[in-house]
Image: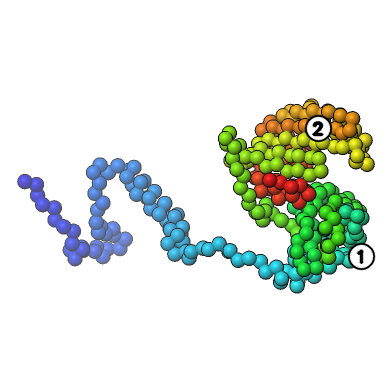
């Protein structure tokens, strides 16, 4: 029978009081005295020390809650003289109105010409200013703060120390009843969500129409894949010949662009252009058309921005 191992008793430890003597208080016994075991133990110890702050934070942190609060619009209007609230400020429309959109960027000379709204943007800075970097919208209101129309500003560039006139077609009702305006910058997260129905082929379709142009945006799983643009331009328009030549040149360019096919038909009373764009194979930047969006764009982006250009989308 194996001899029973005597338990370790700390009371029996005798300390050698000789100077610099080694005192043994215990012994770690391993099966084979393998050095790998020692490295493993020290490795686990180092890992524990390294992750200790994270573990403490995890078990002690307070629950973080998202901020669901809504901005106080009235406070923003009352504080409209501050540059920080400039894009949310509402202004009474009059001949001498001047608005500081951003530092060194001023908007003034607001005026109506029938159903066209015109204003001047002045760049007082030492660098050119591009509207391409942000999504700015002009909102037009009645005296009672009822929104009449929202217009997305074109992505133009203003040279340094220069001014540019911008003009936008508006509805007759807007031209008649606008008393207040404001410029507001919107992020894509601010755009309202929309839901598109699916066809039997699991495709989603958004159709936007305005004055002889019909754009069909084809989505799959809420990601834009293709665009079909049909234009029927009547010779009753005063600038018919200019548009005729412009679209002839565009069709020629489109047909030399990979992923795009376009046809041009002149009927005598009008011209018709039918353009099909496969966004999976097309570099959309080369087409230089604000109505054409990138591959995988969300439906809400197309809907919100196209309606801000005067289109009716459904």
| Front-lying residue, 169 or 286 | 169
Q: Which residue is mark 1?
A: 95
In the image shown, does 114 or 276 lie closer to the viewer?
114
Where in the figure is residue 199, as x and y percent of width and height?
A: 59, 37
Query: Is 248 placed above or below 91 here?
Result: above
Where does residue 74 sit, x and y in percent of width and height?
A: 71, 71
Q: Earlier in the sequence, mark 2 or mark 1?
A: 1
Q: Who is closer to the viewer here, 25 or 289?
A: 289
Q: Which mark is residue 273?
A: 2
Q: Residue at x 89, y 66 (%)?
A: 94
Q: Is residue 108 visible?
A: yes
- Residue name at image x 71 percent, y 38 percent: 216
Tell me if residue 258 comes above or below residue 130 in the rendering.
Answer: above
Q: Is residue 128 visible?
A: no
Tell me which residue sits at (24%, 64%) in the image.
15
Place of residue 209 in the rendered image (x, y in percent of width and height, measured from the top left): 76, 43
Work out whether 24 lies above or below 229. below
- SS at circle 1: loop
In the picture, measured across the screen, residue 155 lies left or right of residue 67, that is: right
Image quadrant where residue 120 sits:
bottom right
Q: Horizontal and vertical percent for residue 269?
A: 89, 33
Q: Quadrant of residue 299?
A: top right
Query: SS of the residue at dot 2?
Result: strand
């Amino acid at each position: 029978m194996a001899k029973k191992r005597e338990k370790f008793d700390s009371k029996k430890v005798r300390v050698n009081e000789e100077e610099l003597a080694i005192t043994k208080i215990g012994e770690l016994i391993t099966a084979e005295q393998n050095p790998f075991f020692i490295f493993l133990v020290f490795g686990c110890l180092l890992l524990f020390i390294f992750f200790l702050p994270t573990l403490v934070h995890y078990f002690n942190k307070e629950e973080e809650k998202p901020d669901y609060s809504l901005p106080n619009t009235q406070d923003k209007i009352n504080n409209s003289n501050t540059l920080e609230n400039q894009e949310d400020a509402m202004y009474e429309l009059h001949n001498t109105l001047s608005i500081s959109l951003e530092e060194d960027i001023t908007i003034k000379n607001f005026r109506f010409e029938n159903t066209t709204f015109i204003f001047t943007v002045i760049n007082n800075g030492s660098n050119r200013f591009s509207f391409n970097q942000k999504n700015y919208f002009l909102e037009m209101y009645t005296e009672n703060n009822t929104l009449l129309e929202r217009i997305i500003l074109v992505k133009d560039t203003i040279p340094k120390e220069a001014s540019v006139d911008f003009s936008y077609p508006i509805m007759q009702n807007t031209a008649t009843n606008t008393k207040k305006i404001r410029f507001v910058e919107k992020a894509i997260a601010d755009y309202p969500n929309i839901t598109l129905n699916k066809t039997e082929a699991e495709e989603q379709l958004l159709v936007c129409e305005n004055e002889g142009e019909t754009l069909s945006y084809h989505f799959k799983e809420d990601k834009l894949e293709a665009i079909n643009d049909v234009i029927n331009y009547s010779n009753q328009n005063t600038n018919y010949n200019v548009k005729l030549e412009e679209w002839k040149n565009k069709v020629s360019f489109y047909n030399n662009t990979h992923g795009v096919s376009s046809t041009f038909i002149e009927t005598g009373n009008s011209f018709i252009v039918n353009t099909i764009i496969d966004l999976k194979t097309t570099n959309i930047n080369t087409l230089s058309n604000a109505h054409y969006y990138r591959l995988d764009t969300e439906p809400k982006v197309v809907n919100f921005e196209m309606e801000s250009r005067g289109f009716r989308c459904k």
